[in-house]
Amino acid sequence: MNLDLKTIPAQLASLLEKTKKYAVFSFIIITLGLVGYLVARVNQLSRLEPSEDAALEKIEAVPRPRVDQDVVNRIVELRDQNVQVETLFKDARNNPFKE
């Protein structure tokens, strides 16, 4: 085999002619390989569990809601004062079509 710069285009053209008939088959095989790899990788990543440290870190990062005791006392006081409204709600739940 003679490797001369002038013969390289002719050799590439003959190689292209030989491989042209396998182009569709090669494309299908490569595409199926990529799809198979992606399905396997997605399956692997979907089964992946976070570590205990990562889970605890996320849980600790969530701020806990705080309600002042004064607000709680005020809500309880307002609920106790409004007995009539509470009974109206109970009546409406029992018979919503009553006027």
Image: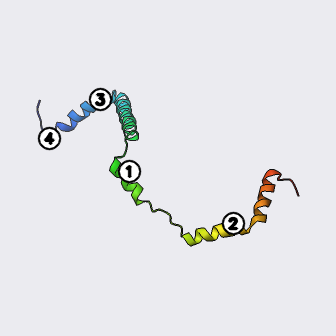
> Looking at this view, is 56 or 75 the one in front?
75
Q: Which mark is residue 6?
A: none
* Mark before the other along the chain sequence, 1 or 4: 4
> Looking at this view, is 12 or 26 the one in front?
26
View extreme (right): residue: 99
Give the residue at x 14% y 40%: 5
Residue 25 position, x and y percent, is 36, 27
Secondary element type, mark 4: loop
Does 33 sit left or right of 85 as displayed?
left
* Mark before the other along the chain sequence, 2 or 3: 3
1 vs 3, front mark: 1
Secondary element type, mark 1: helix
Residue 40 position, x and y percent, is 37, 35
Secondary element type, mark 2: helix
Residue labelled with disc 4: 5
Residue labelled with disc 3: 19
**Quadrant of residue 80 within the rendered picture:** bottom right
When the figure is inspected, residue 45 is found, relative to residue 57, above or below; the finding is above
> Looking at this view, is 48 or 42 the one in front?
48
The crowding category of the residue bearing disc 4, from other C-alpha atoms within 10 Å (few below 14, some 14 to 19, many at least 20), is few
- Under mark 4, the amino acid is Leu
When the figure is inspected, residue 53 is found, relative to residue 73, above or below; the finding is above
Give the residue at x 35% y 51%: 54
CB within 8 Å, label 1 to label 4: no
Quadrant that contains the C terminus: bottom right
* Mark before the other along the chain sequence, 4 or 2: 4
Residue labelled with disc 2: 79
Whole-angstrom CA distance, mark 2 to mark 3, is 84 Å
Residue labelled with disc 1: 55
